[in-house]
Image: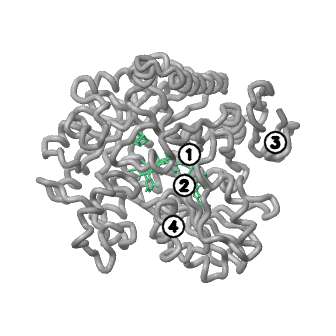
Amino acid sequence: MSVHLVNPSDNSFGTAVITPRWLFVLAAATPQSAGDPILVDESLEQMDPSTIQPGDVVGVSVHTGNALRGYKVGRIARERGAWVVYGGIHATLFPEEALEQGHAHAVVKGDGDLVWSRVVADCFAGHPEKVYEGGRISGSDFLPARWDLMQPGKYMWASLQTIRGCPKHCSFCSVWRTDGQQPRQRRFQSVIDEIISLRRIGFRFIALADDNFYPVTLTDLRLAREQNNLARVEELTAIRADRFHLMDELAKLPKDMVFFTQITMEAGEDGDYLDAMRKANIKGALVGVEAVTPEGLKAVYKDWNYSGEALAKQLQTFKQHGVHVLGSFIFGLPTDKPATFDATVEMALKAGVTFAQFVMMTPFPGTVDFGRWEKTHAVDPTLVGDVPLTRYWLIPTEVRPKMFTPHPSMSADEIRERTQRVWDRFYTLGAIWERSACTPTLRARIAFIFLSKLYRQMYAGTGISTDSARRKKAKKWARFTARQCRKLFQAKPMPELLYPHWEPAIAAAPLRRPAFLPGDGLTEPSPFAVIPD
Ligand code: B12
Ligand code: SF4
């Protein structure tokens, strides 16, 4: 009996930009008695149903965007006699739906790191529970991933998590509700060990798949001091100190490493933090700009963000400190007007952001926006076929609308077309070439151009376009570019790189080390050894 873990996707490119981290973390959480799990990432290639045998356990992860494909995977697996278990953000929010539509035997809500071994054991024993509460585990329980099970040569960037949760409460985001507002920091020793295991096998580009890499702002600290809340000051100071400690350790890693993370704009006020990021080789960050006007920011509960001239200045500060910005902008907010599109792209160009994404307002389940929108459909629900629009992820992709919430003055098509034009304008070859001047070598400049074009095709060309011919062309192009890009990201493996010796005094709990790579000639602890304090 085997354990299979499937990352569902309708689009298989043969190569992927970022590793789906859950796959390799759940692999680490799979009990040794079950043997090595079989990992299938459908963004590379589709699952082969014939590999599934009766009595196997098939774990499927679903977020809202891939739920429909995920449910199909589960149904196929169940037909073949396997135990089917769902997890991930969407299954956490809609366990009943996964049971019904995905023919699940069980659903895991929340974090899988600790609970998964029990689920597998229950399935093999023939009596899984319907719903398991994985909960929000503490940072010291985050598992390092089983990178030794990754298909070689398929991914450009590895992904790694240093923190979960976000103290903010943006209206379009579910993270603060599902992962919680209390930041849960992983122990830096465990982070560094895992990075070393990745560098050893030739990964030097790593995405820090964190909700918010800047959990404590200077304003948070100032307010706590002004309120004379000493306990809070102490708590915030400790979280902040831990971040700096992590960055100090990152700075000691091989100099060719490149990290990328997600952060709030307030970090722009914190020169010390940005400098530490730069020293730690965190060379880029996704910054949620969302809207360029005060009204737009208010609409998404993000009025602590800057707008206008101050916004351009704030974003430029990142660059001045050596941290490149991937600006993320949302279109389709009720406050948007036709002029907003040009104003946004002009702001993105003026602020000198290195990359930008322009996403269309989507009410994701678990968000404040979704709750409001769902209420408006309570009495007279709109149906597409027999599926309510408020369950849009269950509508077949060919007929699924591209926008769901009506805009007060623009049609969905107008917003989509204007958004497409904004992508086109930001990613003209001339504009990319100009931005690529930030790279040190010609090779890096070429990599930058390829990556910009790939990003544009993968996210805009295959996503917001309603024209199926254009979508098909974009997919073909993205597949080709992805292959070329991957080569540019390859690095020479460094099997000689040693794990640091961590002083037991620093370690508060047993430290799990990532699996070492067989044949690297180094005497290292056995895979997943628990190192005693
Ligand atoms: C890193 C990240 C990305 C990266 C990398 C994606 C990748 N290839 O991995 C990038 C930047 C590319 C990205 C893109 C997008 N993302 Co994103 N992303 C994240 C982020 C910050 C972390 C994900 C991660 O790797 N976590 C680390 C792993 C270990 O945690 P995990 O996936 O939650 O898995 C744990 C549990 O959920 C559970 N689990 C998960 N699967 C399973 C399966 C089983 C069987 C079991 C038992 C348990 C289990 O156990 C795991 C270990 O504890 C999350 C935020 C979040 N908190 O989830 C958003 C998030 C997943 N993204 C989100 C969105 C909306 C997007 C985009 C649509 C954004 C956009 N508009 O373009 C795109 C979609 C891309 C795509 N087609 O998939 C939303 C999803 C909302 C939803 N309801 O689906 C999230 C939740 C953020 C948010 N703001 O709300 N994303
Ligand atoms: S959008 Fe970013 S800042 Fe806002 S709640 Fe989500 S993770 Fe936090």
Q: What's the amino acid at mark 3?
A: Val
Q: Nearer the viewer, mark 2 or mark 3?
A: 3
Q: Nearer the viewer, mark 1 or mark 3?
A: 3
Query: For the residue with label 2, is its CB less than 8 Å from the closest atom of ligand 1?
Result: no
**Residue at label 4?**
95
Q: Residue furthest right?
A: 523
Question: What residue is shown at x 63% (from left), y 50% (from top)?
Answer: 153
Query: Gap in Å between the C-alphas at discs 2 and 3?
Result: 34 Å
Q: Nearer the viewer, mark 1 or mark 4?
A: 4
- Image check: 494 left or right of 181? right
Q: What label does residue 156 carry, if any?
A: 1
**Residue at label 2?**
15
Residue 71, image x, y percentages: 50, 72
Of the numbered discs 2 and 3, the one sitting upstream in the chain is 2
- Image check: 280 left or right of 461? right
Element class at badge 3: strand
Question: What residue is shown at x 76% (from left), y 60% (from top)?
Answer: 36
Q: Quadrant of the C terminus?
A: top right
**Residue at label 3?**
530
